[in-house]
Image: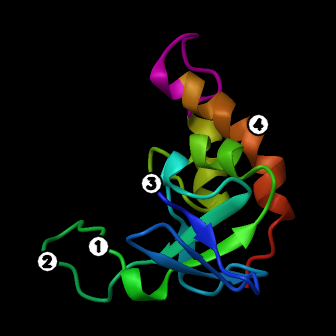
């Protein structure tokens, strides 16, 4: 995959999507777990479409993607794989699963979130 940052540092393109580089998470946006499909050091952000094709749908607005520069982006992305894509959802998940049986998915995910949460808290959320 060819991921590029434009000359002025305002946009990131990964061949399929274009991300506007921003300094804070705009209202209505959350972290988008696309893992290694993003240039290192940038956290992808997305917003859900107003209308979904089915109840519980998670279609995003691909024409309004954003990204924040943060060195720990991959640590954060490893923690948001289960849909806990805001600080509040991460805190709720940790509270629920931090004492789960060792080795279970819930416990491992809670540990990843504990590691990522200090970095997520460094991000400005509008």
Q: Which mark is residue 22?
A: none
| The N terminus, quarter of image | bottom left
Mark 3 and mark 1 lie on one chain; the one further toward the N terminus is 3
Mark 4 and mark 1 lie on one chain; the one further toward the N terminus is 1
Measure the C-alpha gap from mark 4 to mark 3: 28 Å
Q: Is most of the magenta stretch helix, strand or loop?
A: loop
Q: Which residue is mark 2?
A: 53
Does the CB distance between marks 1 and 2 fall below 8 Å?
A: yes
Q: Callout 3: few (<14), some (14-19), or many (20+) C-alpha neighbours within 10 Å?
A: few
Residue at 45% x, 52% y is: 83
Residue 18 visible within the image: yes
Q: Which residues are magenta?
A: 97-106
Q: Is residue 126 left or right of residue 104?
A: right
Mark 4 and mark 3 lie on one chain; the one further toward the N terminus is 3
Please tell me whether mark 3 or mark 1 is closer to you in this view.
3
Which residue is more in the foreground, 73 or 121? Answer: 73
Q: Is residue 44 left or right of residue 17?
A: right
Q: Which residue is mark 1?
A: 59
Q: Which residue is mark 3?
A: 1
């Amino acid at each position: 995959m060819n991921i590029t940052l434009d000359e002025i540092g305002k946009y990131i393109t990964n061949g399929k999507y274009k991300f506007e580089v921003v300094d804070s998470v705009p209202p209505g946006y959350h972290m988008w777990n696309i893992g290694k499909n993003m240039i290192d050091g940038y956290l992808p952000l997305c917003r859900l479409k107003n209308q979904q094709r089915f109840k519980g749908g998670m279609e995003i607005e691909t024409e309004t993607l954003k990204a924040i520069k943060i060195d720990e982006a991959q640590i954060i992305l490893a923690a948001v794989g289960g849909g806990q894509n805001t600080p509040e959802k991460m805190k709720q998940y940790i509270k629920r699963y931090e004492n789960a049986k060792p080795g279970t998915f819930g416990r491992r995910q809670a540990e990843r979130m504990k590691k990522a949460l200090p970095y997520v808290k460094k991000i400005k959320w509008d």
